[in-house]
Image: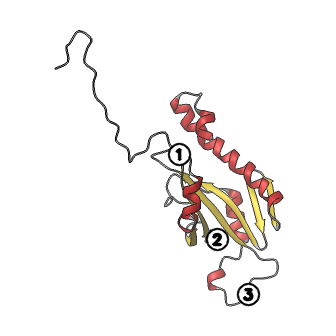
Amino acid sequence: MAYEHCSRFHDEEARDFRGFYRWIQLRDEWRGLSGRFAGIEASAEQYHTLLKAGRMKLTACSLRQVTDPIKFANYRQDYALESNLNLFALEQPLPDDGYIYGIFIHGVDPLEPRQPGFGRVVFPTRDLQTRLHEIDLFGRFEDLVLSLKTPTSIDPQITPSIRLRPKKDQKQK
């Protein structure tokens, strides 16, 4: 949808604007989750939407490539510092007021900007520099992801048969 809505602009501006459009679209859709699923709270925070489900907090971050570092933001740093993500090294259970912080990273397919390229939930260290664990949503739910992709206008499996027409004044041989 972002591709179509931004197509009225020149190519450069449309490319730059699509990211912002998708960001606002994602924030809006995430806030709608709390009305659709019991136990999920979604709040509009400054510059992000925060999802809470039980003892989990989740924000989003768009990246160009799945391997890119997580973009720094003060709110991400705050959530990561406050979280108890020594989880995998804990010798004690998570405190009653503790939570686990994750970041939904997502990006656009570089070859087809109308399509999503990846979606993962990553669990960062407190300094956001390392991913302790990640869940590849596109790998785990591959059939669902494929069923939701928008068909492109050209099927790469089909090779069109192209022939030049003879000029009107030339006779066909």
Farthest residue in the top direction? 169
Residue 116 sits above or below residue 40 on the image: above
Residue under pointer 3: 93
Q: Pointer 1 and pointer 2: residues touching (CB < 8 Å)?
A: no
Task: For the N terminus, give its image quadrant.
Answer: top right
Residue 7 is drawn in which quadrant?
A: top right
- Left of 142 or right of it: where is 163? left
The tag earlier along the polypeptide, 1 or 2, is 2
Residue 4 sits above or below residue 57 on the image: above
Element carrying mark 3: loop
Image x and y of residue 89, in percent:
62, 85
- Left of 152 or right of it: where is 71? right
Element carrying mark 1: loop
Name the residue: 79% across, 73% down.
54
Q: How many marks?
A: 3
The tag earlier along the polypeptide, 3 or 2, is 3
User: Residue 126: which numbered mark, if any?
Assistant: 2
Element carrying mark 2: loop
User: Residue 151: which numbered mark, if any?
Assistant: 1
Identify residue type, mark 1: Pro
Task: For the C terminus, give its image quadrant.
Answer: top left
